[in-house]
């Protein structure tokens, strides 16, 4: 497990500045690259205390749920993942999580329809409102297909990739914001932005 953990740490670090985390079979986060904390602004402290449950954090009304712009579609995607897990392994904890997640109310700003349009028929994006503007991520889940260790076989890596240019631009602004805070905490002046000036005519 120590070698596997080191490998996962390298993968998570290489995925920065985009979020990535490893979860156990109950969707509790066991490793994270701690990227873009701005995405979790406004989430309840109770949901952010370890062990953080990724399903609950994303969909709970006190978590990211109210800021997910395609909440009904994302919940439908999440529910389908849980149902497939339960079909493969009738786990009582997963059944409880599924019942909880399926019962979360749809945000008042949305109509609750689980619609899929265009590319969303192939891959459901996570569309999220942030104070810097809306972002959109595509999620990939990787499992260890040749794992012989039971604990390792129950871990999965989830990585979020930007789905459009606007998300890349906002992510860059979030990263610059974090770097400035780190510089200030170490007593250094924040990095200056270079502006292009027109040459006098």
Image: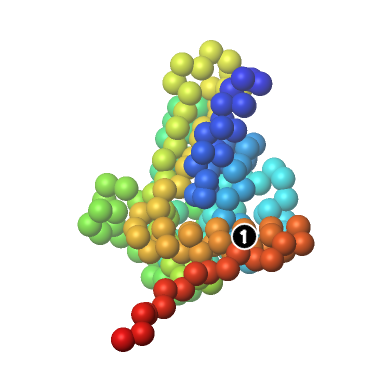
| Position of residue 200 in the picture relative to residue 156 (left or right) | left
In the orientation shown, which residue stands out farthest toward the top?
148
Q: Work out whether 155 lies above or below 82.
A: above
Q: Position of residue 56 (x, y in %)?
A: 59, 51
Which residue occupies 51% across, 17% down?
147
Which residue occupies 72% across, 62% down?
188
In the orientation shown, which residue stands out farthest toward the front?
201
Secondary structure of the residue carrying tag 1 is helix
Label 1: few (<14), some (14–19) or many (≥20) C-alpha neighbours in 10 Å: some
In the orientation shown, which residue stands out farthest toward the bottom?
201
Front position in the image: 163 or 44? 163
Q: How many marks?
A: 1
Front position in the image: 137 or 18? 18
- Mark 1 sits on what residue? 178
Q: Position of residue 148 (x, y in %)?
A: 53, 13
Q: Determine which quarter of the picture holds residue 145.
A: top left
Q: Position of residue 47 (x, y in %)?
A: 67, 54
Q: Position of residue 62 (x, y in %)?
A: 62, 63
| Residue 165 makes an appearance in the image | yes
Which residue occupies 59% across, 33% down?
9
Quadrant of the drawing holding the C terminus: bottom left
């Amino acid at each position: 497990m120590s070698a596997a953990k080191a490998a996962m740490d390298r993968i998570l670090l290489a995925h920065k500045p985009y979020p990535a985390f490893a979860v156990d079979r109950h969707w509790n986060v066991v490793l994270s690259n701690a990227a873009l904390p701005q995405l979790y602004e406004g989430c309840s402290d109770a949901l952010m205390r370890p062990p953080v449950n990724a399903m609950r954090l994303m969909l709970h009304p006190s978590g990211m749920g109210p800021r997910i712009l395609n909440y009904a579609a994302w919940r439908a995607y999440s529910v389908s993942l849980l149902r497939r897990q339960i079909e493969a392994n009738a786990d009582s904890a997963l059944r409880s999580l599924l019942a909880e997640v399926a019962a979360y109310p749809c945000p008042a700003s949305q109509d609750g329809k689980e619609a899929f349009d265009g590319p969303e028929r192939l891959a459901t994006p996570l569309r999220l409102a942030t104070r810097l503007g809306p972002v959109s991520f595509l999620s990939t889940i990787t499992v260890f297909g040749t794992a012989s260790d039971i604990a390792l076989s129950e871990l999965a890596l989830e990585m979020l990739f930007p789905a459009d240019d606007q998300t890349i631009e906002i992510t860059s602004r979030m990263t610059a914001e974090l770097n400035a805070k780190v510089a200030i905490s170490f007593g250094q002046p924040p990095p200056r932005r270079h502006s292009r000036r027109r040459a006098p005519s």
